[in-house]
Amino acid sequence: YPTMKKHNYSAGPCILPQDVFEEAAQAVVNFNNSDLSILEISHRSKDFIAVMEEARALVLELLQLENKGYQVLFLAGGASLEFLMVPYNLMAQHGKAAYLDTGTWASNAIKEAKPFGETVIVASSKEQNYTFIPKGFDIPNDASYFHCTSNNTIFGTQMKSFPKTNVPLVCDMSSDIFSRTLDFSQFDLIYAGAQKNMGPAGTTLVVVKESILGKTGRYIPSMLDYEKHIKAESMYNTPPVFPIYASLLTLRWLKKLGGIAAIEKINEAKAQLLYDEIDRNPLFKGTAAPEDRSIMNATFLLLDENHVPIFDKMWKDAGISGLTGHRSVGGYRASMYNALPLESVHVLVDVMKELELVVCK
Ligand code: PLP
C-alpha cells in the first residue's frame, strides 16, 4: 500500500487504493495515451469495450465462477435498484419470496419486493436493533428465491455461513464483496454497489446465474430486465464509464495482490487487532454479537459518554477520519474495507490505548 493521506474509516463512498485514484485521475486527463479522456471516448469504441470485457472477466476470475453459467453486469442505479430488479426478474407471478431481515438494507429490500407477491420474512433481529444474525430458520420450498445481506454495514454484523436451500440464493454483498473467500457458486445472484470494495459510486455489480432468469412470466421494463442487459453485454444503454474503469483498476490491484485469499488474510488481521482492543480496553464495548462480528465494519461504544470529546479529538489528531457511527446506532463504526491498510488499524488501536492511559491516570 502506498502511504495514505488519512486513515479513512468511512463507510463509503468510496475507499480505494491510492494508486487506483491516481491512475483513474490520469485516465480522466489522458486515457491510454489517446489524448482523450476516459470520459469522452465512445463507450462503443474498442478501447472501452476492452475495459468492460476485462472487468467482467476479472470479476468471474476473482470469484472463481468462470465457466459456471454466470453473467456479470455493471449496472447503474445503486444496490437499492437491485432491491427492485431482483423481485421483478425472479419472483413468480402470484408467488412468494423469502427474506432474512438483518438490518436497514435488508428491510429496504423487503419493502421493494412486497408489491410483487408474498414476502416471507424467515427471521429478523430487528427487535434487538439488528445486533445479531438470526440462525436456524426455515426457507419455504415454494419460494421463488431466498434473499439475504451478507454484511450489515450499519450494524456491523456479517453472515459467516449461508443456508443450504433448494431455492435460488440471492445475496446483497455491497459491503463485503471481494473481502473474503466463500464458495461463490452457492449463490444464484450476487449484487453489490461498487462503492465500498470495488469502485466509485455509480455502478452496481450483478453476478447472476443465467439459468434462473426468464421464468416469471411477467413483463419486465427493458432497463430492469437482466436478460436484456446480458444480451447487450452490459451496454444496453450508456454505461457509467468512469466507475467501471476505476472498478477495473481495483480488480487488477486485487489480482496483483494475490486475489481474495490474500486480502482476506489482511482483513482478518485488521479485524482481529481492533476487536481484541475493543474487548481488552475497559473504556470500550462492541455492539454486535461476537460470533457475528463483521470483518468490514466494527461497531463499538465508549462506555462513559464523558470520554467522547477527548477520544474524538485524539483520533482526529492522529489523522483518522470517518469513525463516527451511523446515526441509527450511534457510537463508533470503523469500516475496514479492502483498501484500508493494517497500519491504519495500528494507529486507531494506539489511540484507544492512549485514551485509557489518559483517562485512567
Ligand atoms: N446494501 C448494503 C449492504 C449497503 O451497505 C448499501 C449502502 O451502503 C446499500 C445496499 C445501498 O446501496 P446504494 O446506495 O448503492 O443504493
Image (spheres, helix red, strand yellow):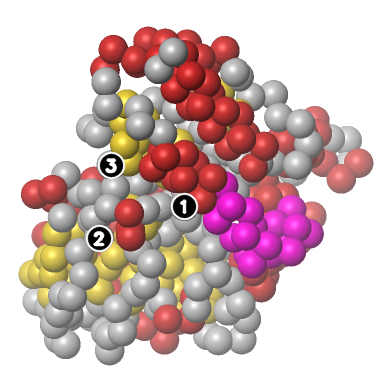
Alpha carbon separation for disc pair 1 and 2 = 14 Å
Which element carries disc 2, helix, strand or loop? Answer: loop
* Numbered disc in front, either 2 or 3: 3
Q: Residue at point 41% right, 86% down?
A: 211
Estimate the x, y position of residue 231 in percent, counting from the top left.
52, 73
Highlighted range, magenta: 252-270
Q: How far is disc 1 from disc 3 in space, using C-alphas?
A: 14 Å
Q: Nearer the viewer, mark 1 or mark 3?
A: 3
Residue tagged by mark 3?
Answer: 287
Residue at 47% over, 63% down: 206
Name the one closer to the observer, 150 or 213: 150
Residue 193 visible in the shown view: no
Is residue 281 left or right of 260 when viewed as pictured? Answer: left
Q: Amino acid at mark 3?
A: Thr
Q: Which quadrant does the N terminus fall into?
A: top right
Q: Amino acid at mark 2?
A: Ile
Which residue is disc 2 drawn over? 133
